[in-house]
Amino acid sequence: MASMTRPVAVLSAAMVVFVAIAFATTATAHPLAPSLLEIVEAAPGHADVRWKTPANKMPGATMRPVLPPHCVLSGTPVEEAVDTAIVRKWGVACSAPLTGSTISVEGIAASQADVILRVALADGRVFSAVLTADAPAYVVPARESPIQVMRGYLELGVEHILTGFDHLLFVLGLMLLVSSRRQLIWTVTAFTAGHSVTLSLATLGFVNVPSAPVEALIAFSILVVAVEVARGTDAPPTLMRRFPWAIAFAFGLLHGFGFAGALSEIGLPAGEIPLALLSFNLGIEAGQLVFCALGLVLYAIARRLRLVRPVRMRWAAAYLIGTLAAFWFFERAAASFVPA
């Protein structure tokens, strides 16, 4: 156990800072959530537009979709509140094809949040992109290459895991729970295997689970891990302590449904579904590995600084994780009972 004393101290210190930032930034698990601009071509010359933005946004920030000039409004726009977002829907009549046209969003820089763009053509082709402050426009291609599909969904996967404080807190909880590097590798691998299974099944339509209870249970899984970490290594070993990889796999199945919820908003491109799904999974893992690597870097620094009192830091980190997880759980559980 002595070999893990300093890693635990470093990870715990990182946890204290991480959770403090999470609390200061937002009360939800996904701060500055990306907006969604979806354009679905119902028939040649007509498309339905859906513009979804978070209800909570930066003060004074306003984003506005800019469609091609040959697409004009048709019908009356409709606006409704859905969970924590505002959804606006309207139809457009286009005198020219969408392929080759430029679609953009104004005000991304001020909002400090990206925009996920999804364009579904009448012939079944689907294009996706992430609009950012540096790249606020997208030209609908005649056909998206496999390289473009892979790069786009890799970026989406990395962005989702790195902006998902709840998933990251769970991974850090696992890092505090295990007692050796070898056990850490098996535990994180099991978590990866678990969420990859349910992400694939849910995205492909084989399993359909309501998002509200899933999000609440994800928060509960973080709370369970935090409680186990707070018990310390001197307490009688529990099933979670003896077989952390099994618990990580089981909870990974649950977190996979959460990842699938994000991917379902984006959709998968026709003809490139396996590649897009694999790329999104790889993006999630890449972001997760970057996060874990940060802990190892902090450990290397701590070896030079000779950090002490790991027990106190571990205890503080466990309670901070548990407090935030409990808040999320009760908030999401209450939201799941609110009529839509």
Image: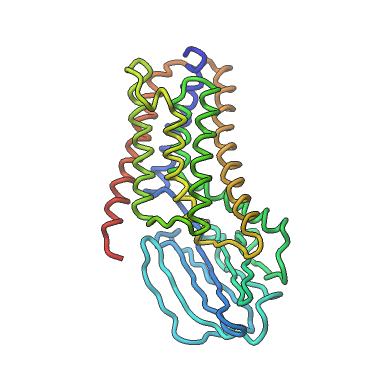
Percent position of residue 324, x then y: 35, 40
Q: Is residue 286 above or below residue 15?
A: below
Quarter of image, res 310 = top left
What colour scheme does the image use? rainbow
How many numbered discs? 0
Q: Residue at x 62, y 62 (%)?
A: 129
Horizontal and vertical percent position of residue 325: 35, 40
The x and y percentages for residue 212 are 35, 55
**Would residue 26 appear left or right of 150 to someone viewing this image?**
left
In the image, residue 239 sits, relative to residue 122, either above or below, namely above
Q: Residue at x 34, y 41 (%)?
A: 220
Q: Where is residue 110 drawn, in percent x and y? A: 53, 60
Q: Residue furthest top?
A: 2
Location of residue 72 (image quadrant): bottom right
Q: Quadrant of residue 181?
A: top right
Work out which quarter of the rendered image holds the C terminus and state it. bottom left
Q: Nearer the viewer, residue 143 or 56?
A: 143
Relative to residue 221, is residue 181 depicted above or below? Answer: above
Front residue of this view, candidates 275 and 28: 275
Residue visible at 45% across and 58% down in the picture: 58
